[in-house]
């Protein structure tokens, strides 16, 4: 009788298993509103983090996502990362068609096992299981599942269910399990629902959930993505990584853990000590001494990436850098710090989250957000910042990779949050001066000087190290006309704390202006002009975010034959808004006309309701620059 009951139970279960797979998340069940602006829809996701101790945790990741079109293919890919501290297991990847019918259960032998930083790191143990399906018919659905066991950790997985603007989310759950001996901190943003908490003995379970989040258009000048979509960060108080115990309940405590990693790594070999002594004897003041040591670093070392275990956080020692002449950002910074220490100058190993557009470190939520190290050299009257991985970087300059953001300076007493330098609007300037001599044929000789300063230096300094053909290619890409011959091209730089680069060129341009009868028609610009903004101002999601202010100034003198007189030219214009300013003035003088323009964009966050004004601002500039200057030849 017992066997009969068991058999009947199995019969009841089998149809459920079959039909559930046959109708597995059909695309027809997606709510209509989730299709708008989406190339993929997360049907169901559950990310579960279970913490057993300060050196043991587990992540279970389960994801069902429907790919709607070719633009969403990369969202339905397996990327399972692992290393000696993270063991990857229980991987599965299943593919279904639009109706939810099973297409393929991918065999584990089909997963690629590859370096997570292929071609990037000299030493690394970060690897990845990777699989990308090739399905020609859309939509289709993939089901991905895997587990990661952490043997020590310094940061815990966070949750951002809508990780791209063109993804809709039907349902996503984030669950964290821990106990009273392994407390975590959590910080949520942009969530409508509060966390749900369950208690079972000394174990606590925290659950966050979102449903029916719509995709949205990518918007120009939008806020950082973390300000727009739901996100939950979690971080441990106590942690262990590669046998090194630490506490990050405060920034000071986390800094102490990093300081412990650095202990004893600043010992120099005798040759390096003698070198510092020689440099010191040749220096005329302290700043000059720092500058000479930095020059030695740039001329005698090169950057390599190290991503191996604790080596991702702990540099190899200064003597090793001296011997082999290379290191990662940690090692090169530590080496420079050791050289300065030998010279009697204190400096601070400083953690920073690098990137030209990256999210701000959360001052009230200590955690491991950092991906780069720079050196802070504080003096009573000023602070010098050194980027130790770039052989071409001017002394004291950081650039848009690490400027104006919170960083963690590592001192003997622990970690201290500090802010890297900001390059002000008045320092971020592109200024051009041109003299354009136009012949009756419409051909022209163009003499131009462009100066790029501050953050604008980053955009142009690379030209210094490129060959002549690439420099000419830059001209073809950035001038509005292309029918010209380069007769002279020079580029130079001023490697100051606020650096600048000068670009001088002479062009022989064919058909620069149009000729019709007795008239010359001149396009009133030289470098590529402004582009119109997207006009969807009624449904904008983000406020207007301008992360850096800058100024563009152009002066152009047009000269034609004395036989020509000015017949028509664009009116002077002045546009002024809270977010920016544009003014253009034309000064005629016989057969000459001087065009002076200035474009200013102001750093700040401006209400999205101002976007219509923002669009008008750009459209008025574009329209003005379309206007022609007309000279007419005398009879």
Image (spheres, helix red, strand yellow):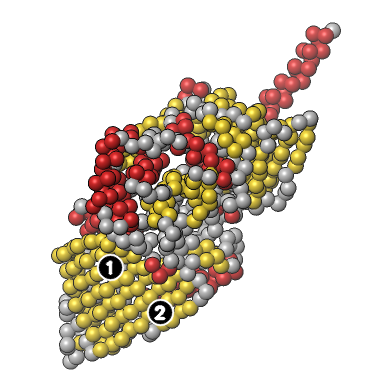
Residue 275, numbered label? none
- Residue 290 location, x and y as percent? 33, 52
- Count neighbours of disc 2 (C-alpha within 10 A) and say few if under 14, some if 14 to 19, many if 20 or more: some
- Residue 442 location, x and y as percent? 20, 76
Q: Which residue is at 56% across, 32% downward?
A: 245
Q: Is residue 379 visible?
A: yes
Q: Quadrant of residue 333?
A: top left
- Residue 235 location, x and y as percent? 61, 40
Instruction: Give how far apart the Cα atoms at labels 2 and 1 are.
Output: 19 Å
Q: Which residue is at 71% across, 20% downward?
A: 14
Residue 583, numbered label? 2
- Given residues 81 and 385, the one toward you in this image is 385
Quarter of the image that includes the C terminus: bottom left
Q: Which residue is at 37% across, 70% downward?
A: 552
Task: Name the outermost residue toward the left.
Answer: 487
- Count neighbours of disc 1 (C-alpha within 10 A) and say few if under 14, some if 14 to 19, many if 20 or more: some
- In this view, 324 is above or below 470: above
Image side of residue 608 versus residue 260, left or right: right
Circle 2 or circle 1, nearest the eye: 1
Q: Is residue 142 visible?
A: no
- Residue 310 location, x and y as percent? 47, 32
Q: Which residue is at 46% across, 56% downward?
A: 420
- Given residues 386 and 520, the one toward you in this image is 386
Instruction: Classify mark 2: helix, strand or loop.
Output: strand
Precedes in sequence: disc 2 or disc 1: 1
Residue indicated by mark 1: 450
Task: Name the outermost residue toward the right.
Answer: 1
């Amino acid at each position: 009788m017992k066997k009969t009951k068991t058999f009947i139970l199995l019969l009841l279960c089998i149809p459920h298993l079959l039909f559930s797979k046959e109708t597995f998340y059909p695309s027809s069940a997606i709510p209509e509103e989730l299709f708008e602006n989406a190339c993929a829809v997360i049907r169901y996701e559950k990310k579960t983090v279970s913490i057993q101790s300060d050196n043991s945790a587990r992540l279970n990741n389960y994801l069902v996502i429907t790919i709607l079109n070719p633009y969403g293919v990369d969202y339905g890919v397996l990327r399972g990362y692992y290393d000696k501290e993270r063991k990857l297991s229980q991987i599965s990847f299943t593919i279904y068609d639009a109706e939810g019918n099973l297409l393929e259960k991918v065999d584990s032998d089909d997963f690629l096992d590859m370096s997570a930083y292929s071609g990037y790191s000299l030493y690394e143990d970060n690897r990845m299981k990777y699989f990308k399906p090739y399905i020609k018919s859309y939509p289709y659905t993939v089901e991905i599942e895997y587990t990661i066991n952490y043997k020590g950790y310094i940061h815990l997985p966070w949750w951002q269910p809508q990780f791209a603007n063109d993804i809709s989310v039907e349902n996503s759950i984030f669950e964290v399990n821990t106990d009273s001996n392994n407390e975590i901190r959590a910080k949520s943003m942009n969530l409508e629902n509060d966390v749900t908490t369950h208690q079972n003995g000394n174990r606590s379970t925290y659950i966050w959930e979102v449903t029916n989040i719509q995709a949205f258009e990518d918007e120009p000048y939008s806020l950082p993505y973390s300000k727009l979509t739901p996100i939950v960060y979690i971080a441990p108080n106590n942690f262990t990584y590669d046998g090194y115990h630490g506490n990050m309940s405060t920034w000071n405590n986390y800094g102490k853990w990093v300081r412990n990693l650095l202990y004893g790594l600043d010992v120099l070999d005798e040759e390096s000590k003698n070198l510092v002594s020689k440099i010191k004897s040749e220096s005329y003041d302290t700043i000059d001494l720092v500058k000479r040591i930095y020059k030695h670093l740039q001329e005698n070392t090169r950057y390599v990436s190290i991503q191996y275990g604790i080596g991702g956080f702990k540099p190899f020692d200064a003597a090793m850098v001296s011997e082999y002449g290379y290191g990662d950002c940690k090692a090169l910074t530590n080496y420079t710090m050791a050289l300065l220490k030998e010279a009697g100058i204190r400096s601070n190993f400083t953690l920073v989250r690098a990137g030209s557009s990256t999210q701000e470190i959360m001052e009230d939520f200590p955690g491991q957000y950092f991906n780069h190290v720079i050196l802070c050299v504080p003096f009573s009257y000023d602070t010098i910042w050194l980027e130790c991985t770039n052989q071409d970087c001017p002394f004291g300059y950081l650039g848009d990779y690490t400027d104006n953001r919170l960083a963690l300076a590592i001192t003997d007493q622990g970690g201290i949050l500090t802010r890297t330098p900001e390059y002000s609007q008045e320092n971020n300037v592109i200024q051009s001066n041109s003299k354009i001599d136009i012949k009756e044929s419409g051909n022209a000789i163009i003499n131009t000087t462009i100066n790029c300063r501050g953050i604008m230096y980053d955009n142009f300094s690379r030209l210094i190290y490129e060959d002549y053909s690439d420099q000419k290619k830059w001209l073809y890409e950035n001038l509005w006309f292309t029918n010209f011959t380069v007769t002279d091209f020079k580029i130079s730089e001023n490697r100051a704390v606020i650096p600048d680069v000068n670009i001088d060129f002479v062009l022989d341009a064919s058909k620069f202006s149009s000729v019709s009868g007795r008239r010359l028609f001149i396009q009133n610009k030289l470098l590529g002009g402004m582009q119109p903004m997207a006009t969807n101002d009624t449904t904008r999601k983000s406020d207007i975010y301008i992360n850096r202010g800058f100024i563009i100034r152009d002066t152009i003198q047009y000269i034609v034959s004395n036989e020509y007189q000015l017949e028509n030219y664009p009116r002077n214009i002045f546009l002024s808004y809270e977010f920016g300013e544009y003014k253009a003035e034309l000064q005629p003088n016989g057969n000459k006309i001087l065009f002076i323009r200035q474009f200013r964009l102001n750093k700040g966050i401006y209400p999205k309701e101002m976007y219509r004004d923002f669009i008008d601002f750009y459209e008025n500039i574009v329209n003005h620059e379309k206007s022609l200057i007309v000279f007419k030849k005398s009879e």
